[in-house]
Image (cartoon, helix red, strand yellow):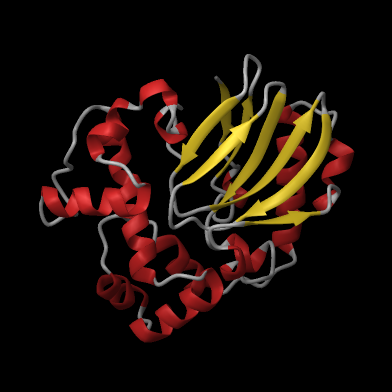
Amino acid sequence: MNYVEISPTNEISSFVKCFWKYENKDKDAQYTIFPNGYFELFMIFEQQHLFSVFLSGLRTKPFEVFIPKGIIVSAIRFPLSASEYLFEQEICSIRDTTMPLDSNFWGLKKWENLSFEDRTKEISEKISHMLSEKEIDRKKLSLLQTVYSPDLTVKEIAEKILWDRRKINRYFNHQFGLSLKTFLNIIRLRNSFEALKKGTLYPDSNYYDQSHYIKEVKKYTGELPKDLSKNECDRFLQFSVNKKS
């Protein structure tokens, strides 16, 4: 597996989680991907030719991906804030699915022959320019950053941001296609993956008891904690790369 990840510059870090590339050199690969609280813009390359670009929405259940030998997958992972300020649209309609984009979306086609690192620099500059022309709602941005904490409840977030819980849920359902509670459950579970990678089958916080944790793992991954921890044949991509997804 050849996986590379680049962190965004501070200038765009509130709207981009990371840039990553996966190169499949040896053989066809099949993976299971789990919900992680982010949506992504995918660029699919073959022999440096960009032949497919698509947007993948928030996931609430596991999904299977097949990557043929010789294919390079490059992607930008976005937090929730990017939906309004970079894409200017709701993403509830692509929850648990994908939406094809033109291969020259954001001018990506002109950078297809660049290295991953140089392409990332160009895209970063593009995003920075786009953000410079936006008027950012700081209260909303604070909400969309706070929800990535695995330790807060819906009530605590509403009190912290000074927003009514019902208004927050209406906004989440309209913009992202799920409730804030469901989103927080996904973030809490994703945060526990690091412990699972190390063989800890039950995290010591954020869950009522072990049976509650097992139920949540099964709900969002379709697997038991012990099977995730084993990750036989590197089936679970988020357990096979060194960095968090």
Q: Is residue 3 left or right of residue 172?
A: right
Q: How many labels, in total?
A: 0
Tell me, yes or no, if residue 171 can be seen here.
Answer: yes
Q: Among all residues in the image, which is located at the extreme right? A: 110
Residue 12 percent coordinates (x, y): 61, 51
In the figure, 90 relative to 185: above or below?
A: below
Query: 207 and 223: which one is in front?
Result: 223
Q: Position of residue 151 (x, y in %)?
A: 25, 57
Q: Quadrant of residue 184?
A: bottom left
Q: Residue at horizontal 61%, vertical 63%? A: 94
Residue drawn at point x = 46 percent, y = 65 percent: 144
Quarter of the image where one finds residue 206: bottom left
Q: Is residue 240 above or below residue 169?
A: above
Residue at image position (72%, 21%) is 70
* Residue at far left of view: 209
Give the residue drawn at x 16%, y 49%.
Answer: 205
Q: Quadrant of the N terminus?
A: top right
Residue 194, image x and y in percent? 31, 35
Viewer-side residue, 84 vs 24: 24
For the question of whether residue 164 can be seen, the reply is no
Q: Residue furthest top?
A: 26
Relative horizontal placement of residue 121, taking residue 97 as reference (left or right): right
Q: Position of residue 42 (x, y in %)?
A: 68, 44
Which quarter of the picture shows residue 89? bottom right
* In front of the other: 157 or 135: 157
Q: Is 141 left, or right, of 209 in this rendering?
A: right
